[in-house]
Amino acid sequence: MPTCTCENRVVDEESHVCQLKLPAGDGEEEMQEYDHAVRYRDGSVRLRNPNIELMDQDILYHLALGSESHDLVEMFGDVKFVCMGGTPKRMEQFAHFIMKEIGHKLPAGTTLLDISQYSYRYSMYKVGPVLSISHGMGIPSVGILLHEVIKLMYHAKVRDPVFFRIGTCGGIGLEGGTVVISEEAVDGMLKSYLELPVLGKLVRRPAKLDRQLARDIKALAHRDDPYDTIIGKTMCTYDFYEGQGRMDGAFCEFTENDKMEYLNKLHKAGVVNIEMESLSFAALTHHAGIKSAVVCVTLIDRFKGDQVLAPKEVLDEWQIRPQQLIARYITRYLQRKGRLSLEGHGSMCVKSPRRFKLVQQESENYD
């Protein structure tokens, strides 16, 4: 094998991935052993819910899709990567960005379609094997979306999908603009699991992310990137203000010293950033047996303040940074698979016009 001469490796990066070969887990052709609770023999997604296959139609209310109204295999069967972020605008921008990065071209006279436009809740764009979806803000919003996207993977018979959350966060001892790849998600009590009351009982699901995937992404950081890219623990809160120790909300019943003491406690525990979705994202993807990673950019060092004061043009540039890193991972994977410039731009494929209208009506009821 030729000697590695990669120019873009990070100095002293132990987990550098040679550009001459795929990292562990990138080879779809390798023999894999699947957890039969979450995978069929061909690697396609299997649900932990036997009720779904008994339903006449499964309506994905918040995506405005249905298992019998739409041909989901035709529409989404080629998906490999699902990229999620907070706002519809950001994920529309990412869809256009990844389209350029992977060399995808739309047919003449067409444009990117918001596939979930009739739901008025989330937006979803398809660019070849990449889905770009907005997840809203907070654990409940991303949790609802994940239930329906995981079911979409099942109905579309998608094999071995990879999920990414691309977002923003507050840093703990990190300057604004630093890219953070989460190795683990914890809550405000530093517990690494999601707690969910189900039928009066508290269910705990481990919030595990794929650490090899995190290392593979980190290895794609370039030495000439004008910012740092690090791996660390992420604290996920249920609240933007009090839960994150902010003193500028409508309520504040703690002192500056209390806040700094807590932030120092987090820092000593290895927590490097704070956001509001990773716990649910990690717990649900892990429970579904789906490889996933969280990559965010810091907008502020919380040791230095509560409010984001950077100019808009600076914030816009910072928010592109995690997108660029994920785009490198996706592009490299597709290059090695010979799958760049694929067709498949997220057009609507209706199986039953009657059921299609029904799904639209049901989704609009959840406005």
Image: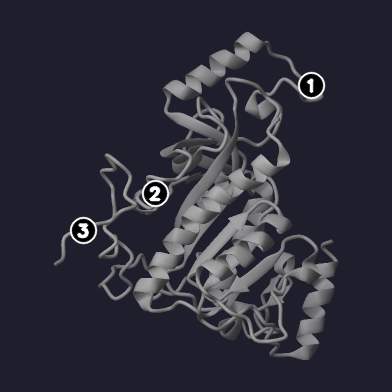
Residue 98, given in percent of the width and then of the height, sits at 56, 65
Per the image, label 2 sits on a secondary structure element best described as loop
Give the quadrant of the N terminus: bottom left
Mark 2 or 1, nearer chain start: 2
- What residue is drawn where x is 48% and y is 41%? 226
Q: How far apart, in angstroms, are the residues tagged by discs 3 and 2?
A: 15 Å
- Residue that numbered label 2 is attached to: 222
Placement of 230 over or under 333, stated as above or below: above
In the image, what residue type sits under mark 1? Phe
Q: How far apart, in angstroms, are the residues tagged by discs 2 and 1?
A: 42 Å
In the image, what residue type sits under mark 3? Cys
In the image, what residue type sits under mark 2? His
Q: Residue furthest left?
A: 1
Q: Is residue 38 visible?
A: no
Mark 3 or 2, nearer chain start: 3
Q: Name the image quarter holding residue 132.
A: bottom right
Per the image, label 3 sits on a secondary structure element best described as loop
Q: Nearer the viewer, residue 72 or 270?
A: 270
Q: Name the image quarter holding residue 160.
A: bottom left
Q: Name the image quarter holding residue 100.
A: bottom right
- Residue that numbered label 3 is attached to: 4
Residue 114, given in percent of the width and then of the height, sits at 72, 71
Which is more foreground, mark 1 or mark 3?
A: 3
